[in-house]
Amino acid sequence: MMSILLVVRHADAGDKRSWRRPDLLRPLSATGRSQAVGLVERLQDYPIERILSSPAVRCQQTVQPLARDRYLPIQSSPTLGVDGNAAELLALFRDRRLSETVLCGHGETIRWLLAHLAADGLVGDAPLQAAKGSTWLLERTGRQVHAHYLPPLALAWQEAEMAGGH
C-alpha cells in the first residue's frame, strides 16, 4: 500500500535576527505570503486529507491558504516545531494512518528527517534541500520512500484572486 506525505518548509519569514519578539510569533514576510498562496497552486494535483503544522505562526500562515482552499482545519503539532523531538518526528513520519497529509515544519527538522531517510535508503530526484516554501512529496511503499522535490512557487494575492483562488 502506498501512502503520500507532503512535507512543507514554512515560507519566508524575513530575517530572524531583526525580529525582537519570541521567534514562535514571527510572521511571514510579503514574499512568504506569496509563497503560501503559491502552495495552493503547487499542490493542486495532490489529494490532501489532513494538514499538520508546527505551532509557529510562520508555519501556520504558510498552510492557511491551502487549508482554506481544501476546507480543512490546521492541526497544530509540537512534533513539527523547531524544537521537536527527533524520535517523535520519525514516529509521526512512519505513522501509516497519515496519508495524503501535509506536514509543515522548519528547515532544521525537515533536513534532519530527509538525512535520516537518506541513510535508510531514500530514493530521490533532487539533492536534499529545503528552500523556504518548498515541498517534498514523499511516497511510502512498504519500507521504501521515494522523494520528489517541489520548489516554492510565489503568487501574488491579486493573481490568486483573479485566478479564482481564495
Image (cartoon, rainbow, N blue to C red):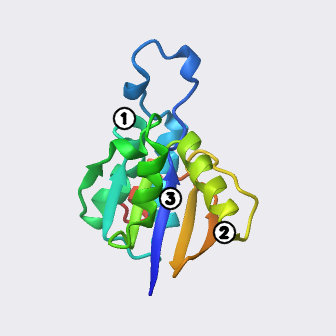
Where residue 151 appears, x then y in whole percent? 64, 58
Residue 30 vertical placement versus 34 (above, below): above
Say what secondary structure mark 3 lies in.
strand
Q: How many marks?
A: 3
Q: Residues within 10 Å of mark 3 (few under 14, many from 20)?
A: many
Residue at image mark 2: 122
Residue 7 image label: 3
Q: Nearer the viewer, residue 27 or 115?
A: 115
Image point (58%, 17%), residue name: 17
Residue at image mark 1: 57
Q: Is residue 108 left or right of residue 86?
A: right
Q: Residues within 10 Å of mark 2 (few under 14, many from 20)?
A: some
The amino acid beneath tag 1 is Val
Q: Give residue 146's quadrant in the image.
A: bottom right
Q: Are marks 3 and 1 in contact (CB under 8 Å)?
A: no
Q: Nearer the viewer, residue 39 or 157?
A: 39
Say what secondary structure mark 2 lies in.
loop
The quarter of the picture where the C terminus appears is: bottom left
Where residue 35 appears, x then y in whole percent? 52, 49
Q: Is residue 6 left or right of residue 49?
A: right
Which residue is most to the bottom?
Answer: 1
The amino acid beneath tag 2 is Leu
Q: Is residue 124 left or right of residue 66?
A: right
Q: Are marks 2 and 3 in contact (CB under 8 Å)?
A: no
Image point (38%, 45%), residue name: 79
Is residue 73 something one can see in this rendering? yes
Q: Are marks 1 and 2 in contact (CB under 8 Å)?
A: no
Q: Give residue 61's quadrant in the image.
A: top left
The amino acid beneath tag 3 is Val
Where residue 16 appears, x then y in whole percent? 55, 22
Residue 122 vertical placement versus 110 (above, below): below
Image point (24%, 64%), residue name: 71
